[in-house]
Image (cartoon, rainbow, N blue to C red):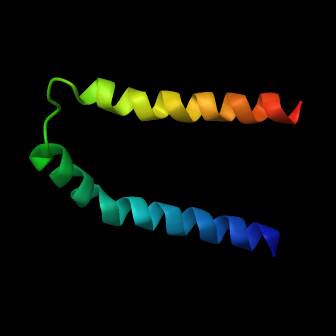
Amino acid sequence: MELFLKITAAIVLGLMLFYLWPVYKHWQEHGPKAQRGDWPAAILPLGAVVLLVIALIMAVR
């Protein structure tokens, strides 16, 4: 039964990739282009999350 589930999951993932490939290509060609200031706007919340996780780990110790 376990082998059947693994094979089924592999087939489903393969079909999903096959189905979503045209959508990915469309997004890559027609998606918004990065502008000046996009990276700092993304790094600030990510840094805040990292600091929060570090604070939570330190609180548990």
Q: Residue at x 26, y 52 (%)?
A: 24
Camera-nearest residue between 30 and 16: 30
Q: Quadrant of the N terminus?
A: bottom right
Asked if residue 36 lies left or right of residue 20, the reply is: left
Q: Which quadrant holds residue 58? A: top right
User: Where is residue 51 drawn, in percent x and y?
Assistant: 60, 28
Residue 2, quarter of the rendered image: bottom right
Residue at 62 percent of width and 71 percent of height: 8
Give 29 or 59, whichever is nearer the viewer.
59
Compared across the picture, whether 34 is left or right of 60 comes to left
Residue 60 pos. (x, y %): 86, 36
At 51% from the left edge and 31% from the top edge, which residue is drawn? 48
Residue 45 place in picture, x, y as percent: 44, 35
Against 24, is 34 above or below?
A: above
Q: Position of residue 36 (x, y in %)?
A: 15, 23
Q: Is residue 45 above or below residue 19?
A: above
Q: Residue at x 10, y 48 (%)?
A: 30
Q: Tell me: residue 28, above or below residue 8.
A: above
Quadrant the C terminus occupies = top right
Q: Residue furthest right?
A: 61
Residue at the left extreme, as displayed: 30
| Badge count | 0
